[in-house]
Amino acid sequence: MKLALYGLGSRATAYYLQELNKQYNLKKGGYSTCPLWLYNTNFNNINPLLPNTSKALDAIVKKDLQAIKAIQPHKVIVPNITLHETIDRIDTTTDFIHPLPLTLEKIKQHQVSKILLVGSLHSMQAAYLNSFFKKNSIAVVLPTDEEMELIDTARKAIYSYTETKKQVKAYQKILKNYAAKHIVVIACTELSILKPQGNRAIVDMADLQIHNAVQIVF
């Protein structure tokens, strides 16, 4: 199976590559690394247009996806949760490893009808994720306004490699506190990178994509 990775933000893409290689190596052993094709776009053309959808963003993503399709991959993995809203609208033929159905499946395994959503400030408040969960009978709870601001500040710092120990500790504390009462869903790759480890109540969209990709190519 041919797997293609749509390279976007530097740290997010590096995280996906690292975890894909790590999980593949755990299965195959030796010096194994995950076989894939990397299409690394210039994220500077995309990031200033996010998080909102637009014709300008559509045009850039369409061009990139055409280049990826030329590789003829069986599956494509996208290391940016927000960008899936644009991809959903403009491409219905490419087989993406989409985080939303994978997340829904995981939530159902926990047998809950309510989650705590964590992501960028936009993702937590916008309709894209909230409407998906509502449509599938999953109620969404959000952190407090103060906590959402803190989470988004941490996200921006992680993106630029400028996070402090204090920021990471505060971010992880919020997740741990909510995970004691809720299933916490992480919908932002930067927040996935420094999430608390080993907590089964935390469902990470990035990890679900990566695990699914390794299962496919293994």
Image (tube, grey):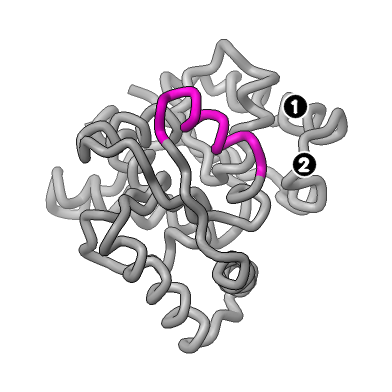
Reading the image, the residue beneath label 1 is: 63
Position of residue 191 relative to residue 111, above or below, is below
Reading the image, the residue beneath label 2 is: 52
Q: Secondary structure at mark 1?
A: helix
Q: Residue at x 54, y 23 (%)?
A: 71
Residue span colored magenta: 126-138
Q: Is residue 135 magenta?
A: yes
Q: Secondary structure at mark 2?
A: loop
**x and y, in percent, of residue 166 in the image:** 49, 88
Q: Amino acid at mark 1?
A: Lys
Position of residue 123 relative to residue 70, above or below, is below
Horizontal side, residue 151 vs residue 1: left or right: right
- For the C terminus, give its image quadrant: top left
Q: Amino acid at mark 2?
A: Asn
**x and y, in percent, of residue 177 in the image:** 34, 70
Task: Specify the quadrant of the image occupied by residue 91.
Answer: top right
Q: Tag on residue 174?
A: none
Distance between the alpha carbons at the discs numbered 2 and 1:
18 Å
**x and y, in percent, of residue 176 in the image:** 32, 69
Q: Is residue 47 magenta?
A: no
Give the overall secondary structure of the magenta segment.
helix
Q: Nearer the viewer, mark 2 or mark 1?
A: 2
Please tell me how crowded label 2 is: few (under 14), some (14-19), or many (20+) other residues with Cα within 10 Å.
Answer: few
Q: Residue at x 54, y 17 (%)?
A: 94
Q: Residue at x 20, y 50 (%)?
A: 25
**x and y, in percent, of residue 184 in the image:** 36, 53
Please tell me how crowded label 1 is: few (under 14), some (14-19), or many (20+) other residues with Cα within 10 Å.
Answer: few
Viewer-nearest residue: 83 or 183: 183
Q: Residue at x 71, y 50 (%)?
A: 43
